[in-house]
Every structure is written in structure tokens, then in C-alpha cells.
Image (tube, coloured by chain):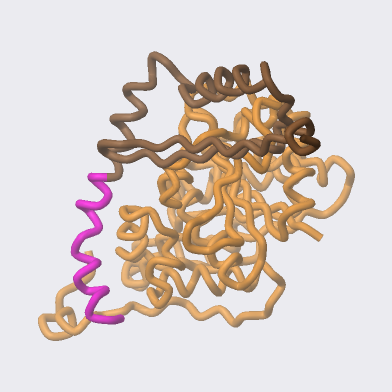
Chain colours: A orange, B brown
Amino acid sequence: MAKVVVVTSGKGGVGKTTSTAALGAALAQSGKRVAVVDFDVGLRNLDLVMGAERRVVFDLINVTQGVANLSQALIRDKRIDSLFLLPASQTRDKDALSEEGVAKVIAELREKFDYVLCDSPAGIERGAQLAMRFADEAVIVTNPEVSSVRDSDRIIGLLDSRTLRAEKGESLAKHVLITRYDAARAARGEMLTIDDVLDILSTPLLGIIPENEGVLRSSNVGSPVTLNEPNNVAARAYIEAARRLQGEDVPLVLPAERKGFLDRLFGRRAA
Amino acid sequence: MSLLDIFKRRGSAPVARERLQVLLAYERSNRQRPDLVAVLREEIMAVIAKHVTVDQDDVQITMERGETMSTLEIDININIPNAAAA
């Protein structure tokens, strides 16, 4: 049975697209058939992060409007053949996306894939609501920072009221994914701690992704970090988060402050 | 981490720059005339439809945009019963 997972946050720039790509790739690397769907109509970026920007022919709206069928619009990843991307439209505006159209596409994706990851646009408007509408589970990407936590709380409220599952009185599993976590700053008391965030949001934790330069390097070259640098700490955190998403019980270790050789030698502090 | 990775890592920002240049050049040139692929596809399909019936499922379109050259690949499965019978 396919699982539809929305990757959402409310706030922009917290790492939804990066996390969608990394989690999607990690699930596909473990043998699942995965579709990642970009819902950010007008401002698509998942294609760029996945390295498929030169291969986009059709998009989500083309499929909802019947201009193209789903198999024509899905772009197969060149590295993992069980990973597919359904890009958002770059030219049309968000109103071109209808609930009926999205329902049809999601239903069709459910038949073909084990996991359908919906990359939500920022905000709480129509685009974000359509991205979450048909979800079975939600990954709420949060930075340990006040405005991000506040926006996550609003999104949790929407997940509990505006999704189809919520309206039918069914449960929708929610998970918090903390990204850009800087252990050194948390240790110095400059950043909300994991416990603070979980306390406030009272939602279970899917994983903690440490702030790491490998994530930027991977976006630069257009490859999910779990594929590009699988041994990187952030990649490993995403791979573990993907295993938890599949229901595995993977113990969570708080990322320690990692010091490189030079840092130790000169006692340089992390920025 | 292999030695190769160390060299590869050095190059990520120039790669990003090059990818963006190619992508933005394409997007800017298409802002006035969106969906060139859709137009091409429609017209090519119309020509083919004059002669044979083609189902949408029998058409696969792939594209690869490059810096100096792009390729548009249209793969159509055409069923010609007359030819088969002949």
C-alpha cells in the first residue's frame, strides 16, 4: 500500500526541498519505488536539487489538465531507477492547480509507487494546502529557531483540520524533522534545543539533520546528499530518518559537536 | 572518502554556476514564449494524426537541455495495420 507523505514547514528556506530530495533518494536507495512531487507551482526547485532541470518536459499541471499523462511527465532519476520526479510548472500560477486534478494524480501515483513525497511550497495558502490535502503522513521540517517553530505549529494546525484524513476523522501521522541543527551553538545555549522544539510542538521526532556543508555541495551539483555523499553526517541522518519513516526503530543519537583536525589543533570555534 | 572525492568536492560551486547559467538562459529565452515543447509536440502530433491514429500512451518525449545544444526526443509507437497485412 502506497504512502503519501507531505514535506511541509510553513516557513520558507528551512530545507523542505532538500529534505524531500534526500528522503526520497534514501527510500529509493533502500529499494522502494518513490515519486517526489514538486507542488511549488511557479517557483519550482526540486528539479534543480535533483539534477533533472534540463530534462523537464511536462509538469504536474499538464497532468492534472490532461495535456500529458503521468508516465510522460515523470522523470526517472539517472542514478537510481526506482526514483521519479514529477516537476511543478514554472509558468502557470497556483490557481491552475485544482483539487480534483491533484486527487486524480495522487490516486494514480499511489498505484505505481511505494512512497509519494509531496514537496510543499512555503506558506499556508492554496498550494501548501493542496500539497498536504491527500497525505497519509507529514514530515514537518523545522529549524531550531523561533519563527520556524511558530510556523511549524501553524502547519500542524492545518494538518489536523484541512487534510482529507482529518476531515474524515482518520489519523494522520506527523513527524518533526529538525534541520540545520548546530550542536556547538545549541551547547552554547544560542539555539533552541531539540527538547525545546519537541516540547513546544508535541510531535514525535523523525530525525535531526546537522548543519553541514555537504548539503550545499550536493545542491550545487544537483544530487540528493544521500546519493552524493552517503557517508556524510547529514546524509546518514537522512538515511536514518527514512528508515524511521518506514516504521523501523532506529535509535536517535544527538549529533555531537564535531571538530576537525585543524579545529582541534588551533582551538578554532565553529561559526 | 576516497582521494577522488577530495578533488570532486573542490568543484561544487563552479558546477552550480554552470548549471544555473544553462537553466536561466533557457528560462529567460522562454519567458515570452512558454511551453515550446508543448507547441512542438502538438504540431508534430497533428502531422502524424493526419496519417495514423496515435494514442497518448504511445508517445514518450524526453528532453536534454545543454549549453550549446539541446535534444528533443519524441518516441512514437505507430501501429500500421495495413502495412502489417501487406
Quarter of the image containing the C terminus of chain A? Answer: bottom left
Q: Position of residue A88 (x, y in %)?
A: 54, 35
Which of the pair A250/A36 is nearer the observer? A36
A238 vs A133: above or below = below
Q: Position of residue A47 (x, y in %)?
A: 46, 44
B73 vs B44: above or below = below
Which of the pair A28/A76 is nearer the observer? A76
Taking the spot 74% from the left edge, 57% from the top edge, the residue there is: A3
A130 vs A235: above or below = above
Q: Look at the magenta stretch and give its main secondary structure.
A: helix
Using residue A218 as the reference point, say whether residue A146 is left or right of it. Answer: right
Taking the spot 62% from the left edge, 47% from the top edge, the residue there is: A118
Q: Position of residue A74 (x, y in %)?
A: 60, 44
Q: Position of residue A242 (x, y in %)?
A: 59, 68
Taking the spot 62% from the left edge, 55% from the top edge, the residue there is: A139
Residue B14 among those drawn in magenta:
yes
Residue A145 among those drawn in magenta:
no
Rendering quarter of residue A10: top right
Tell me which segment is drawn in magenta: B1-18
